[in-house]
Image (cartoon, helix red, strand yellow):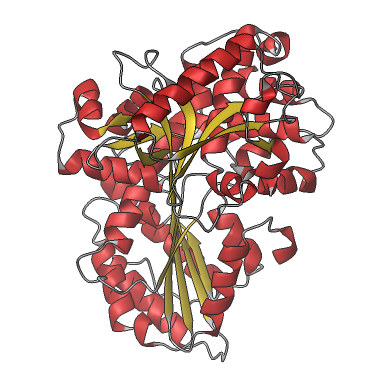
Amino acid sequence: MKSLIIAREKEQAMLDRLLTEPTSQLLTIYGRRRIGKTFLIREYFDDNFAFKHTAVSPLEFKDKDEKLLYRIQLDEFAHSMEKYGARLDGPLKDWFDAFHKLEDFLSKKRSKKKMVVFIDEMPWLDTPRSGFMSAFEHFWNDWGCGKHNLLLIVCGSATTWMLDKLINNKGGLYGRTNREMHMHPFTLDETQLYLESRNVTMDRYDIVQTYMMMGGVAYYMSFFEPGRSLAENIDAVFFSEGGFLGSEYDRLFTSLFADNKNYRKIVEYLSSLRYGATRPQISEKTGITEGGTLSDMLKALVKSDLVTTYYNFGETKRNLYYKLTDMFCLFYLGFVSRNPTNNPHYWYDNQNSPKLNSWRGIAFEDVCFVHQGQIRAALGISGVQSEIYPWKTLGENESSGAQIDMLIDRADRVVNLCEMKFTRDEFIIDKDYDAKLRAKIEALTRATKNKKNIQTTIVTTYGLKSNMYSSRIQRVVPMEALFR
């Protein structure tokens, strides 16, 4: 039911348009695991499909017999056809036979409305030496694309497969996919709507903290129980025995990438860096040879919404930086994997500790980094061309030189020097912070060679306390603006 769908206005608008197109449509949907792809399609169409099939996950199979898995996938596809009314004369011989029979079955349907066919987790069907892709390409090119009343939706979490085999296909499907839908995590505003729909009551201070750990992935937040505090819910899903998200990190990478060892290396290396790294640096530290393979892996990580790219202010455009911005991965690697604990109440017992307060400050920077559009809107510069990135002067390591949480380098010859502060009350600038801020302004002035006007900007939870130092701040963006 559409009424159960939270946000996803753009995605629903695309589905509305595809249903009115006078020709057949092939829609490819991809996005990180648990982002809500299947939920969106199932609820939008209210389970009214001409045919629907979900592939069998190979992840739980201890027996890696390729022939067995191939046979299971075919048999389950046949079962789905029979469930929708097809009459089969025996087991499916191969994927060509499967799609021929699907074609015959769909051809017998008489409907003026679009027939919606949904194949979920399609990458799992493409087992080694199965011939699946050749059969699917033939099905679409020979029959599907010539129909006027067909909407074929294919979906999958395995980003590399979806990009290589469908969206960037250079073979039989080249130029054949009509639309692609990249589903992203929720924003803060959408996160609030989702929590409210589940009767989980939080103020925006706690919703931001939730985002720091869950990154706007609805499935992760579905384990929160109404009536519990944020700390109690975090302990339940991460630190208690049998916590629902205790093994999610491994499953995330297994579902996204077939050979995920090197992807993990990249993510775990980037998780230790506040400002990311260039491709040569990643190659050197991970041992992955720089070249096409590494480039493809980095592109896949970006497409999976795990990594964000940016250029460092003042450096050549050849130096593209890759920064880990997936909140779940950052939180898991920082608190669950690298700092294991047997305390099932770890978060509740330590929520006011210096370690967690320090983490909140850093994580808030990441939240702001993925809500750049909201910050630009709050500053009234949505229509101004700009580049946004964290910035530091070059030093021996990440802790040396001037460091600025976010720079907004604008085409109108203005640079917003943005500092992010996550506090329980109005942020107070004291003498020491004023000195640090002046040093950052001076460093940035040297870097811009006095050619741009620098506007000091604070992005903080509850605004800025007025005192003898606060006049140095020219723009204040409160937490509320990130929810707009």
Pick whichever, 204 or 243, lies toward us. Answer: 204
Is residue 224 visible in the rendered structure shown here? no
Pick whichever, 424 or 262, lies toward us. Answer: 424
In percent of the image, x 34 and y 33: which residue is there?
A: 449
User: Is 430 located above or below residue 175 in the figure?
Assistant: above
Q: Toward which corner of the image does residue 317 lie, by quadrant?
A: top left
Estimate the x, y position of residue 476 in percent, counting from the top left.
Answer: 66, 36
Pick whichever, 109 or 10, lies toward us. Answer: 10
In percent of the image, x 63 and y 10: which residue is there?
A: 431
Pick whichever, 9 or 164, lies toward us. Answer: 9
Estimate the x, y position of residue 338 in percent, counting from the top left.
Answer: 46, 13
How many numbered callouts? 0
Estimate the x, y position of residue 415 in percent, counting from the top left.
Answer: 47, 40
- Residue that protrudes farthest toward the right in the picture: 227
The quadrant of the picture occupied by the N terminus is: bottom right
Q: Is residue 149 left or right of residue 349?
A: left
User: Is 468 located above or below residue 211 in the figure?
Assistant: above
Estimate the x, y position of residue 71 in percent, counting from the top left.
Answer: 34, 54
User: Is 294 located above or below residue 72 in the figure?
Assistant: above
In percent of the image, x 62 and y 72: which residue is there?
A: 48
User: Is 123 located above or below residue 60 in the figure?
Assistant: below
Is residue 18 visible in the rendered structure shown here? yes
Q: In this view, does 253 lie to the left or right of 380?
A: left
